[in-house]
Protein backbone atom coordinates (compact mmCIF):
# COMPACT_ATOMS: atom_id res chain seq x y z
CA UNK A 1 0.00 0.00 0.00
CA UNK A 2 1.42 3.34 -1.13
CA UNK A 3 -0.08 6.53 0.27
CA UNK A 4 0.75 10.03 -0.94
CA UNK A 5 0.15 12.99 1.36
CA UNK A 6 -0.19 16.20 -0.61
CA UNK A 7 -0.72 19.89 0.27
CA UNK A 8 1.28 19.64 3.51
CA UNK A 9 1.80 23.24 4.68
CA UNK A 10 4.75 22.18 6.88
CA UNK A 11 6.44 18.82 7.14
CA UNK A 12 8.13 18.92 10.56
CA UNK A 13 10.70 16.65 12.19
CA UNK A 14 12.80 15.87 9.12
CA UNK A 15 16.06 14.20 10.11
CA UNK A 16 18.89 12.56 8.18
CA UNK A 17 19.26 8.83 8.70
CA UNK A 18 21.49 7.66 11.54
CA UNK A 19 20.84 10.39 14.12
CA UNK A 20 19.46 8.58 17.13
CA UNK A 21 19.05 11.43 19.64
CA UNK A 22 19.52 15.18 20.06
CA UNK A 23 21.50 16.89 22.81
CA UNK A 24 22.21 20.45 23.94
CA UNK A 25 21.83 23.03 21.16
CA UNK A 26 20.69 20.33 18.72
CA UNK A 27 17.45 20.26 20.65
CA UNK A 28 16.60 23.67 19.19
CA UNK A 29 16.72 22.30 15.65
CA UNK A 30 13.65 20.94 13.88
CA UNK A 31 14.02 20.07 10.22
CA UNK A 32 11.07 21.41 8.24
CA UNK A 33 9.92 21.69 4.64
CA UNK A 34 7.12 24.00 3.50
CA UNK A 35 4.59 23.08 0.78
CA UNK A 36 5.53 19.44 0.79
CA UNK A 37 4.38 15.97 -0.12
CA UNK A 38 5.28 12.70 1.59
CA UNK A 39 5.01 9.17 0.22
CA UNK A 40 4.60 6.10 2.41
CA UNK A 41 5.09 2.59 1.13
CA UNK A 42 4.35 -0.59 3.05
CA UNK A 43 3.97 1.32 6.31
CA UNK A 44 7.28 3.14 5.98
CA UNK A 45 8.26 6.63 4.88
CA UNK A 46 9.46 6.24 1.30
CA UNK A 47 10.22 9.82 0.24
CA UNK A 48 9.20 13.44 0.61
CA UNK A 49 9.69 16.57 -1.41
CA UNK A 50 8.51 20.05 -2.23
CA UNK A 51 5.22 20.48 -4.11
CA UNK A 52 5.97 20.19 -7.82
CA UNK A 53 9.01 17.96 -7.36
CA UNK A 54 8.47 14.54 -8.96
CA UNK A 55 7.82 11.35 -7.03
CA UNK A 56 10.71 8.87 -6.95
CA UNK A 57 10.89 6.23 -9.65
CA UNK A 58 10.30 2.54 -9.12
CA UNK A 59 12.36 -0.37 -10.44
CA UNK A 60 10.81 0.09 -13.89
CA UNK A 61 12.10 3.65 -14.10
CA UNK A 62 8.61 5.19 -13.98
CA UNK A 63 7.45 7.45 -11.11
CA UNK A 64 5.83 5.45 -8.29
CA UNK A 65 2.04 5.58 -8.37
CA UNK A 66 0.23 5.94 -5.03
CA UNK A 67 -2.70 3.64 -4.23
CA UNK A 68 -4.31 6.46 -2.26
CA UNK A 69 -3.83 10.21 -1.98
CA UNK A 70 -4.51 12.17 1.22
CA UNK A 71 -5.09 15.88 0.68
CA UNK A 72 -3.62 17.44 3.84
CA UNK A 73 -5.35 20.74 2.97
CA UNK A 74 -2.66 22.90 4.52
CA UNK A 75 -2.16 20.88 7.70
CA UNK A 76 1.13 20.20 9.49
CA UNK A 77 2.49 16.66 9.16
CA UNK A 78 4.83 15.49 11.95
CA UNK A 79 6.08 12.26 13.51
CA UNK A 80 3.70 10.65 15.98
CA UNK A 81 4.57 11.08 19.65
CA UNK A 82 6.78 8.51 21.36
CA UNK A 83 6.05 7.77 25.02
CA UNK A 84 8.97 5.99 26.64
CA UNK A 85 7.53 5.56 30.15
CA UNK A 86 4.07 4.22 31.01
CA UNK A 87 2.38 1.88 33.46
CA UNK A 88 -0.85 1.29 31.55
CA UNK A 89 -1.41 -2.32 32.53
CA UNK A 90 -3.43 -1.85 35.70
CA UNK A 91 -6.83 -2.84 37.00
CA UNK A 92 -9.58 -0.32 37.62
CA UNK A 93 -8.58 3.06 38.95
CA UNK A 94 -7.53 4.73 42.20
CA UNK A 95 -10.03 7.54 42.41
CA UNK A 96 -10.43 7.04 46.19
CA UNK A 97 -6.80 8.11 46.54
CA UNK A 98 -7.51 11.09 44.33
CA UNK A 99 -9.93 12.25 47.01
CA UNK A 100 -7.29 11.59 49.74
CA UNK A 101 -4.88 13.69 47.74
CA UNK A 102 -7.38 16.53 47.40
CA UNK A 103 -7.82 16.33 51.15
CA UNK A 104 -4.10 16.94 51.63
CA UNK A 105 -2.30 13.59 51.76
CA UNK A 106 1.00 13.31 49.90
CA UNK A 107 1.98 10.46 47.54
CA UNK A 108 4.19 9.03 50.30
CA UNK A 109 1.42 9.27 52.92
CA UNK A 110 -1.06 7.51 50.64
CA UNK A 111 1.49 4.77 49.98
CA UNK A 112 2.26 4.40 53.70
CA UNK A 113 -1.48 3.75 54.37
CA UNK A 114 -1.43 0.75 52.02
CA UNK A 115 -2.61 2.78 49.08
CA UNK A 116 -0.56 3.56 46.04
CA UNK A 117 1.26 0.81 44.21
CA UNK A 118 0.17 -1.91 46.69
CA UNK A 119 -3.46 -0.96 46.18
CA UNK A 120 -3.02 -1.45 42.44
CA UNK A 121 -1.23 -4.77 43.10
CA UNK A 122 -4.20 -6.05 45.13
CA UNK A 123 -6.63 -5.14 42.35
CA UNK A 124 -4.43 -6.62 39.68
CA UNK A 125 -4.19 -9.89 41.62
CA UNK A 126 -8.00 -10.17 41.56
CA UNK A 127 -8.31 -9.35 37.87
CA UNK A 128 -8.13 -11.96 35.11
CA UNK A 129 -5.48 -11.72 32.45
CA UNK A 130 -8.11 -11.20 29.75
CA UNK A 131 -9.78 -8.39 31.67
CA UNK A 132 -6.41 -6.71 32.29
CA UNK A 133 -5.60 -7.00 28.60
CA UNK A 134 -8.95 -5.48 27.64
CA UNK A 135 -8.49 -2.52 29.99
CA UNK A 136 -4.92 -1.90 28.85
CA UNK A 137 -5.82 -2.17 25.17
CA UNK A 138 -8.42 0.53 25.68
CA UNK A 139 -5.69 2.78 27.11
CA UNK A 140 -3.41 2.07 24.17
CA UNK A 141 -6.25 3.02 21.83
CA UNK A 142 -6.83 6.21 23.80
CA UNK A 143 -3.13 7.03 23.43
CA UNK A 144 -2.94 6.29 19.71
CA UNK A 145 -6.01 8.46 19.13
CA UNK A 146 -4.09 11.27 20.84
CA UNK A 147 -1.13 10.80 18.56
CA UNK A 148 1.19 8.30 20.24
CA UNK A 149 2.75 5.84 17.82
CA UNK A 150 5.27 4.11 20.10
CA UNK A 151 5.17 3.42 23.81
CA UNK A 152 6.93 1.54 26.56
CA UNK A 153 4.86 -0.32 29.17
CA UNK A 154 6.13 -1.50 32.55
CA UNK A 155 5.13 -4.34 34.84
CA UNK A 156 5.27 -3.51 38.54
CA UNK A 157 1.74 -3.94 39.85
CA UNK A 158 2.21 -7.69 40.28
CA UNK A 159 4.90 -7.72 42.99
CA UNK A 160 5.06 -11.52 43.13
CA UNK A 161 6.31 -13.92 40.45
CA UNK A 162 2.90 -15.06 39.18
CA UNK A 163 1.39 -11.59 38.90
CA UNK A 164 4.50 -9.95 37.45
CA UNK A 165 4.59 -12.61 34.74
CA UNK A 166 0.85 -12.11 34.18
CA UNK A 167 1.53 -8.43 33.51
CA UNK A 168 4.40 -9.20 31.14
CA UNK A 169 2.17 -11.61 29.20
CA UNK A 170 -0.44 -8.87 28.88
CA UNK A 171 2.21 -6.45 27.55
CA UNK A 172 3.34 -9.11 25.11
CA UNK A 173 -0.25 -9.52 23.87
CA UNK A 174 -0.49 -5.75 23.48
CA UNK A 175 2.62 -5.78 21.28
CA UNK A 176 0.75 -8.03 18.88
CA UNK A 177 -2.68 -6.43 19.21
CA UNK A 178 -1.83 -2.81 18.38
CA UNK A 179 -0.11 -1.37 15.32
CA UNK A 180 1.75 0.96 17.71
CA UNK A 181 5.33 0.00 18.54
CA UNK A 182 5.38 -1.36 22.11
CA UNK A 183 8.40 -2.04 24.33
CA UNK A 184 8.17 -3.99 27.57
CA UNK A 185 9.94 -3.32 30.88
CA UNK A 186 10.17 -5.58 33.92
CA UNK A 187 9.62 -3.40 36.99
CA UNK A 188 9.33 -6.08 39.67
CA UNK A 189 11.12 -3.63 41.99
CA UNK A 190 8.32 -1.07 42.02
CA UNK A 191 7.45 -1.66 45.70
CA UNK A 192 8.02 -4.52 48.15
CA UNK A 193 5.34 -7.15 47.49
CA UNK A 194 2.97 -8.11 50.29
CA UNK A 195 4.23 -10.89 52.52
CA UNK A 196 7.92 -10.30 51.79
CA UNK A 197 10.60 -8.64 53.88
CA UNK A 198 12.50 -5.98 51.95
CA UNK A 199 15.58 -8.15 51.42
CA UNK A 200 13.61 -11.24 50.56
CA UNK A 201 11.74 -9.27 47.94
CA UNK A 202 14.93 -7.90 46.35
CA UNK A 203 16.14 -11.49 46.07
CA UNK A 204 12.76 -12.55 44.66
CA UNK A 205 13.00 -9.84 41.99
CA UNK A 206 16.48 -11.08 41.00
CA UNK A 207 15.06 -14.59 40.82
CA UNK A 208 12.20 -13.45 38.56
CA UNK A 209 14.55 -11.91 36.01
CA UNK A 210 15.50 -14.93 33.88
CA UNK A 211 11.82 -15.74 33.27
CA UNK A 212 10.87 -12.07 32.81
CA UNK A 213 13.67 -11.63 30.26
CA UNK A 214 11.91 -14.01 27.87
CA UNK A 215 9.56 -11.18 26.86
CA UNK A 216 10.78 -8.00 28.57
CA UNK A 217 13.07 -5.62 26.69
CA UNK A 218 14.32 -3.68 29.74
CA UNK A 219 14.64 -3.81 33.52
CA UNK A 220 13.54 -1.02 35.85
CA UNK A 221 13.86 -0.29 39.59
CA UNK A 222 12.12 2.43 41.62
CA UNK A 223 15.38 3.70 43.16
CA UNK A 224 14.06 6.27 45.57
CA UNK A 225 13.57 7.13 49.21
CA UNK A 226 11.26 4.63 50.88
CA UNK A 227 11.37 2.20 47.95
CA UNK A 228 14.69 0.65 46.78
CA UNK A 229 18.22 1.71 47.70
CA UNK A 230 21.19 2.19 45.42
CA UNK A 231 22.55 -1.17 46.67
CA UNK A 232 19.26 -2.97 45.92
CA UNK A 233 19.23 -1.32 42.51
CA UNK A 234 22.78 -2.39 41.70
CA UNK A 235 21.94 -5.99 42.62
CA UNK A 236 18.84 -6.03 40.44
CA UNK A 237 20.51 -4.29 37.51
CA UNK A 238 23.39 -6.76 37.67
CA UNK A 239 20.90 -9.63 37.50
CA UNK A 240 19.19 -7.86 34.60
CA UNK A 241 22.48 -7.42 32.80
CA UNK A 242 23.25 -11.12 33.17
CA UNK A 243 19.92 -11.83 31.45
CA UNK A 244 20.59 -9.28 28.68
CA UNK A 245 18.25 -6.57 29.97
CA UNK A 246 19.37 -2.97 29.76
CA UNK A 247 18.08 -0.68 32.54
CA UNK A 248 15.58 2.17 32.32
CA UNK A 249 15.13 3.27 35.88
CA UNK A 250 12.98 5.43 38.15
CA UNK A 251 15.28 7.85 39.96
CA UNK A 252 15.20 11.08 41.95
CA UNK A 253 11.44 11.56 42.13
CA UNK A 254 11.16 11.73 45.91
CA UNK A 255 14.78 12.53 46.85
CA UNK A 256 18.28 12.89 45.41
CA UNK A 257 18.47 9.13 45.63
CA UNK A 258 21.71 8.27 43.84
CA UNK A 259 19.52 6.61 41.24
CA UNK A 260 20.97 8.59 38.35
CA UNK A 261 24.51 7.56 39.26
CA UNK A 262 23.73 3.88 39.64
CA UNK A 263 21.72 3.97 36.40
CA UNK A 264 24.65 5.49 34.53
CA UNK A 265 27.02 2.95 36.10
CA UNK A 266 24.92 0.19 34.47
CA UNK A 267 24.69 2.08 31.16
CA UNK A 268 20.95 2.65 31.54
CA UNK A 269 19.18 3.60 28.36
CA UNK A 270 17.26 6.17 30.38
CA UNK A 271 16.95 7.51 33.91
CA UNK A 272 13.45 8.77 34.50
CA UNK A 273 11.59 11.25 36.73
CA UNK A 274 14.54 13.46 37.90
CA UNK A 275 12.32 15.93 39.70
CA UNK A 276 15.09 16.35 42.27
CA UNK A 277 18.57 16.69 40.84
CA UNK A 278 21.65 18.82 41.39
CA UNK A 279 25.02 19.37 39.73
CA UNK A 280 26.15 15.83 40.61
CA UNK A 281 23.45 14.28 38.42
CA UNK A 282 24.35 16.48 35.48
CA UNK A 283 28.02 15.53 35.87
CA UNK A 284 27.12 11.85 36.10
CA UNK A 285 25.13 12.03 32.84
CA UNK A 286 27.68 13.97 30.81
CA UNK A 287 29.24 11.95 27.99
CA UNK A 288 27.04 8.89 28.58
CA UNK A 289 24.51 7.05 26.42
CA UNK A 290 21.79 7.53 29.04
CA UNK A 291 18.80 9.72 28.19
CA UNK A 292 17.52 11.86 31.06
CA UNK A 293 13.75 11.53 30.90
CA UNK A 294 11.37 13.86 32.70
CA UNK A 295 7.71 13.20 33.43
CA UNK A 296 5.97 16.55 33.84
CA UNK A 297 2.54 14.88 34.08
CA UNK A 298 3.52 13.49 37.49
CA UNK A 299 4.95 16.82 38.64
CA UNK A 300 1.63 18.38 37.63
CA UNK A 301 -0.53 15.77 39.31
CA UNK A 302 1.51 15.37 42.50
CA UNK A 303 2.44 19.04 42.89
CA UNK A 304 6.15 18.24 43.10
CA UNK A 305 8.97 20.14 41.34
CA UNK A 306 9.42 19.90 37.60
CA UNK A 307 12.70 18.52 36.29
CA UNK A 308 15.39 21.11 35.51
CA UNK A 309 15.28 20.41 31.79
CA UNK A 310 16.58 23.83 30.74
CA UNK A 311 19.72 23.42 32.81
CA UNK A 312 20.31 19.94 31.46
CA UNK A 313 20.06 21.25 27.89
CA UNK A 314 22.28 24.25 28.68
CA UNK A 315 24.87 21.75 29.94
CA UNK A 316 24.78 19.97 26.59
CA UNK A 317 22.57 17.05 27.58
CA UNK A 318 19.48 15.75 25.81
CA UNK A 319 16.08 15.46 27.41
CA UNK A 320 13.15 13.15 26.71
CA UNK A 321 9.65 13.74 28.00
CA UNK A 322 7.16 10.93 28.65
CA UNK A 323 3.71 10.63 30.19
CA UNK A 324 4.27 8.14 33.08
CA UNK A 325 0.60 7.19 32.46
CA UNK A 326 -0.40 5.34 35.67
CA UNK A 327 -3.31 5.38 38.13
CA UNK A 328 -1.41 6.99 41.03
CA UNK A 329 0.82 9.81 39.91
CA UNK A 330 -0.08 10.60 36.32
CA UNK A 331 -3.47 9.38 35.15
CA UNK A 332 -3.06 10.64 31.60
CA UNK A 333 -1.27 9.44 28.49
CA UNK A 334 -1.77 12.64 26.53
CA UNK A 335 1.64 13.50 25.07
CA UNK A 336 0.39 16.81 23.70
CA UNK A 337 -0.33 17.82 27.29
CA UNK A 338 3.16 16.59 28.26
CA UNK A 339 4.60 18.78 25.52
CA UNK A 340 2.52 21.72 26.76
CA UNK A 341 3.74 21.22 30.35
CA UNK A 342 7.28 21.04 29.00
CA UNK A 343 6.82 24.50 27.48
CA UNK A 344 4.56 26.12 30.06
CA UNK A 345 6.06 24.80 33.29
CA UNK A 346 9.60 23.77 32.31
CA UNK A 347 10.11 26.66 29.87
CA UNK A 348 11.28 24.48 27.03
CA UNK A 349 10.94 26.04 23.62
CA UNK A 350 8.41 24.31 21.37
CA UNK A 351 11.32 22.95 19.32
CA UNK A 352 12.99 21.48 22.42
CA UNK A 353 9.72 20.01 23.66
CA UNK A 354 8.98 18.59 20.20
CA UNK A 355 12.35 16.80 20.07
CA UNK A 356 11.79 15.58 23.64
CA UNK A 357 8.43 13.94 22.83
CA UNK A 358 9.49 12.44 19.50
CA UNK A 359 13.09 11.45 18.68
CA UNK A 360 14.51 11.56 22.20
CA UNK A 361 11.61 9.66 23.72
CA UNK A 362 12.05 7.07 20.96
CA UNK A 363 15.75 6.87 21.91
CA UNK A 364 14.80 6.38 25.57
CA UNK A 365 13.09 3.11 24.63
CA UNK A 366 15.58 2.03 21.99
CA UNK A 367 13.42 2.63 18.91
CA UNK A 368 14.81 5.85 17.46
CA UNK A 369 16.25 4.03 14.44
CA UNK A 370 12.66 2.95 13.68
CA UNK A 371 10.44 5.92 14.47
CA UNK A 372 10.38 9.42 15.98
CA UNK A 373 11.30 11.52 12.93
CA UNK A 374 10.54 12.07 9.26
CA UNK A 375 13.29 9.93 7.79
CA UNK A 376 12.99 7.67 4.75
CA UNK A 377 12.92 4.04 5.86
CA UNK A 378 11.38 4.74 9.26
CA UNK A 379 7.87 3.65 10.20
CA UNK A 380 5.22 6.01 8.87
CA UNK A 381 3.94 6.97 12.33
CA UNK A 382 2.47 10.40 11.68
CA UNK A 383 0.17 13.09 13.00
CA UNK A 384 -1.71 15.22 10.49
CA UNK A 385 -3.09 18.41 12.00
CA UNK A 386 -6.00 20.58 10.99
CA UNK A 387 -5.01 23.49 8.72
CA UNK A 388 -3.22 26.43 10.33
CA UNK A 389 -1.38 24.57 13.11
CA UNK A 390 2.34 24.89 13.81
CA UNK A 391 4.75 23.58 16.48
CA UNK A 392 4.20 26.61 18.70
CA UNK A 393 0.41 26.50 18.65
CA UNK A 394 0.32 22.83 19.65
CA UNK A 395 1.56 23.48 23.23
CA UNK A 396 0.22 27.04 23.36
CA UNK A 397 -3.44 26.25 22.59
CA UNK A 398 -2.92 23.31 24.88
CA UNK A 399 -6.37 21.76 24.81
CA UNK A 400 -7.78 22.90 21.46
CA UNK A 401 -8.22 19.84 19.23
CA UNK A 402 -5.42 19.88 16.65
CA UNK A 403 -5.28 16.35 15.26
CA UNK A 404 -7.04 15.65 12.00
CA UNK A 405 -5.77 12.09 11.65
CA UNK A 406 -3.16 9.81 13.18
CA UNK A 407 -1.36 7.28 10.98
CA UNK A 408 0.49 4.33 12.43
CA UNK A 409 2.61 2.26 10.07
CA UNK A 410 1.06 4.32 7.34
CA UNK A 411 -2.54 3.42 8.19
CA UNK A 412 -5.16 5.81 9.52
CA UNK A 413 -6.24 5.13 13.09
O1 LIG B 1 6.35 6.51 37.95
N1 LIG B 1 7.17 6.48 40.93
C1 LIG B 1 6.85 5.30 40.89
N2 LIG B 1 5.94 4.71 40.13
C2 LIG B 1 4.93 5.40 39.40
C3 LIG B 1 3.71 5.60 40.22
C4 LIG B 1 2.96 4.37 40.30
C5 LIG B 1 1.72 4.44 41.12
O2 LIG B 1 1.52 5.29 42.00
O3 LIG B 1 0.90 3.57 40.85
C6 LIG B 1 5.50 6.66 38.81
O4 LIG B 1 5.13 7.77 39.17
FE1 LIG C 1 6.78 5.59 36.40
Image (tube, grey):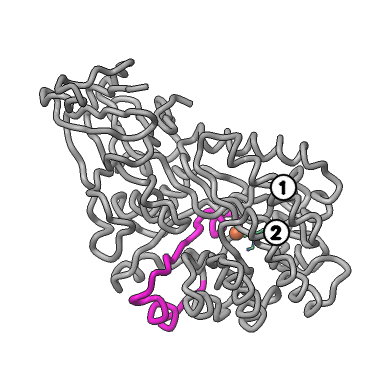
Front-most of 288 and 255?
288
Label 2 element class: loop
> Relative to residue 201, is residue 250 drawn left or right?
left
Disc 1, ligand 1: is the CB inside 8 Å? yes
Q: Does the magenta stretch include residue 199?
A: no
Residue 103 appears in view: yes
Quadrant of residue 249 within the rendered picture: bottom right
Mark 2 surroundings within 10 Å by alpha-carbon count, few (fewer than 14), some (14 through 19), many (20 or more): many
The answer to whether residue 106 of the structure is visible from this angle is no
Residue 179 screen position, x and y as percent: 51, 34
Q: Is residue 305 left or right of residue 98?
A: left
| Nearer to me, 153 or 112 | 153
Magenta span includes 292: yes
At a point 31% along the width and 40% down the height, the residue shown is 377
Q: In which quarter of the image is residue 173?
A: top right
The residue range painted magenta reads 276-301
Compare marks 2 and 1 and give the one earlier in the sequence.
Answer: 1
Residue 166 location in percent, x, y?
76, 50
Checking the image for residue 4, the label placed there is: none
Residue at 40% x, 50% y is 357
90 up-or-down from 347: above or below: above
Which residue is denoted by mark 1 in the rendering?
90
- Real-space Cα separation, disc 2 to disc 1, in angstroms: 9 Å
Position of 214 compared to 73: left or right? right
Asked whether mark 2 lies closer than 8 Å to ligand 1, one says yes
Which residue is label 2 attached to?
156
Amino acid sequence: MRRLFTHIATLAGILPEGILRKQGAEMDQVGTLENAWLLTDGGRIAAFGRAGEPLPCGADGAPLQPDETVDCAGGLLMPAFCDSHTHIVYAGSREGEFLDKINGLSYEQIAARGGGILNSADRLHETSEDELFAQALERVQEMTAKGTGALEIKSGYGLNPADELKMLRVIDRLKKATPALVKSTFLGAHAVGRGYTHDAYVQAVCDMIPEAARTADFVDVFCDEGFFTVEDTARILAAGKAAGLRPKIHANELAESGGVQVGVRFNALSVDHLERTGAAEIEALRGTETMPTMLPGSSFFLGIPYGRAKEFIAEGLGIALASDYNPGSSPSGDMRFVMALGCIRMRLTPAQAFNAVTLNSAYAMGVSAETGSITPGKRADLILTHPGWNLTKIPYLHHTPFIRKVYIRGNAM
